[in-house]
Every structure is written in structure tokens, then in C-alpha cells.
Image (cartoon, rainbow, N blue to C red):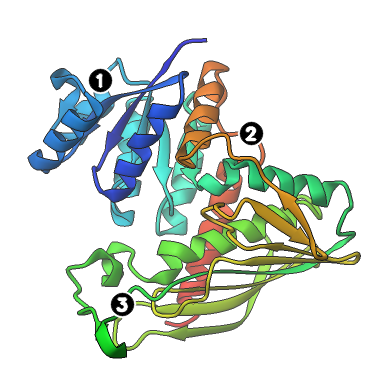
Amino acid sequence: MSIIKWGIIGLGNIALKFAQAFNEISNSKLLGIASIDTNKIELFKNQFKIQKEYCFKSYIDLIKNQDIDIVYIALPHNFHYQWIIECLKENKNILTEKPAVISSNNINEIDKKLCQKNVFFAESFIYRYHPQTAMIIDLIKNNKIGELISMESYFGSNIIEKKKFFGLIKRIKINKKNRLFNKNLGGGAIWDIGCYPSSMSLLISSLKSEINQNFTLRNSKIIREPAEVDLESHTEIQFENGFKSKIGCSIKSNLGYKTKIFGSKGNLIIDSSWHCDKGHLIFDQKEYKIEHKYNNNFTYQIEMISNYLNNKEKEPRFPGMRIKETVLNTKILEKWINSYE
């Protein structure tokens, strides 16, 4: 099998963690980087020993480079659609950061174009590739918790307030120049982190029966003030197969990262749903240990996707996030947000 050569466009914090993952695997190589910030190019070039000829100030130049097999799009949410389309024009394989796009119309268009192209496409949810998720699926498929009934899943921490000395609270300024607080840039808790519990809901529901496009949202709630975007949000997803999922996300409250899956025989508790760093699952007070092969969770994803590319596959295998799920997840997130407008 050949070594798959990766390129990254957008060199922010998430790209840095992604790039560090290549130190742990042998079937993949970080070959190219692109950024409009020359300082970031220089930092990545030096840290990851990127050859000068593969350091680009233009995203399209990296995409067009024939030596690069797949592009990882690590740009802010609102830029994903534009550069996914550019990759498709150049028949370049794609891994895009979540959320893939911030519009159902956009993901439907991408889905149609993918049907006409022989390229790989995936949305980056690293928990989907982790051994912890494999164990969750195994426990459910082997009927350990019985018939699936419902679940609760959360992703939330207070990032707008920081404790200082003597218990004083410092609130960060809500600035629309910050992507997280700008509606037009895909800001707010739902797009940024709500996509995690909604995507987990799709995964677990699919273990009850094959997912379809029919769902309803109930009891949706939002906290927006003092910003124009949602700082905290909750909803309940009712799937057509009878499965229910109560989900919440927040950038102003410490909701945690826990998922609880309720079955007819018992409940499965996942303390660290997204970072997978607790090393165990709990089912009716019994602890299931999880062995970590890699230190960097991106490594599992990069290694598996590189294997798929070597096998000429166009999307990840289950439980990786496939285009059908990305389309439905985008639809859920958009409806969730619009229920407050």
C-alpha cells in the first residue's frame, strides 16, 4: 500500500492538532500546507519539516498540486462549502472539518456533485474512528443493553467566563469579529459543537434501524443574550423508528461531555463522548476498559481514511460519518437553529 499524502488548508489550532497526528502513523504523510498567514506557514513548515515547494499562500494552488492525494479543510465553518466545491472541480479527495457546511442547500448540492465524481468525501468527527465508539457499537449490537429506547447527549463548557482570584468572574467580550459570535460566519453553539450530540444521535439510532430523513424536534430551548448567536441550546430529536434523543450544547455552561444510552436491559454511560480520554465505558456499574493505541485521536481517523484511499473507496466505512448522515445532520442542525428565528 502506498503512503497517502495529505495537504491542509487553514492553519489554526485544529490544524495544528491534526498535523501532530502524522508523527504516530506510517501509511500517511503531511506533504503540503496552505494559509493566507505567512507567519503560520513558517511555523508549520519548521515544526513539521514541510518542503518549501509544498508551502502555499493560495488554497487553490495546494488543491491543484498533483502530489497531494487528499485535502483536509480546516478553515472556519463558513468557508467549507466554497473549498469543498473547489476540491470537487479538481477531483481532489476531501476531509472537511465539522460542520461540513452551514446550509442544507449547500450539502444537497455537494451530495449531487459527489455522485458524478470519483473522489472520497468525509466530515471530520474523530470520535467515530476511535476504539471507544467501536466498543459502544459492539455492546449494543450484542444486545448487552437490550432494545434501544432513548439517549441523552451533551457537549458544553463555559468558555465566555473565566474564574480569577478570590472567586471573581471575568467575562470575555462578545465581539462579532470573533467567528464564534458571528451569525454570518457560522457562529454559535449549535453549529460549533451541537453537531456532535446530533451526529451521535444518528449513529445510535441507526443501530435500532436504518436511518431515514424523517425526524421531528421537540422542546427546543435557547439562550442567546448577550450575543446574536445561540450560546446554549437544547432540543429533543424524535426519529421515525421510535428512538428519541435529548441533546444540548453550550459555550456558557458546563454541560459536560456525557452521553447516556437507555436500553430495555440497562443503561450505557459514556463520560467522555467526544475526546474519548476517560478510557472506559460504564454499563450498569460494570466498567469496560478501552485500550488507546495512539495518543492523538486524529491519528485513528487519518490512518483509516488513508486505508480507504488505498482501497479506492469514496466514503468512510461504518461508523465513519458518511455523506447520507452529513446531509441529515445538517438538516437537523439547520432546523434546530431556525426553530428560534
Amino acid type, label 3: Ile
Residue beneath the point at 37% across and 71% down: 188
Identify residue for label 1. Answer: 65
Nearest the eye: 269 or 183: 269
Which tag, 2 or 3, sits closer to the chain's start? 3
Spatial separation of the CA atoms under disc 1 and disc 2 = 27 Å
Q: On the rendered image, what quadrant is the C terminus found in?
A: bottom left
User: Do labels 2 and 3 touch, CB within 8 Å?
Assistant: no
Nearest the eye: 246 or 331: 246
The quarter of the displayed image where residue 199 is located = bottom right
Residue beneath the point at 86% across and 66% down: 266
Left or right: residue 217 versus residue 173 is: right
Q: Residues within 10 Å of mark 3 (few under 14, many from 20)?
A: some
Identify residue for label 2. Answer: 317
Mark 2: which secondary structure? Answer: loop
The quarter of the displayed image where residue 291 is located = top right
In the depicted structure, whether residue 6 falls above or below residue 272? above
Residue beneath the point at 26% across and 70% down: 182
Identify residue for label 3. Answer: 160
- Mark count: 3
Spatial separation of the CA atoms under disc 2 and disc 3 = 37 Å
Foreground disc of the pair 2, 3: 3
Nearest the eye: 317 or 140: 140
Rendered location of residue 103, percent (x, y): 42, 59
Q: Residues within 10 Å of mark 1 (few under 14, many from 20)?
A: some
Q: Which mark is residue 44?
A: none
Rendered location of residue 74, percent (x, y): 32, 44
Which tag, 3 or 1, sits closer to the chain's start? 1
Mark 3: which secondary structure? Answer: loop
Residue beneath the point at 18% across and 29% down: 45
Rendered location of residue 67, percent (x, y): 30, 15
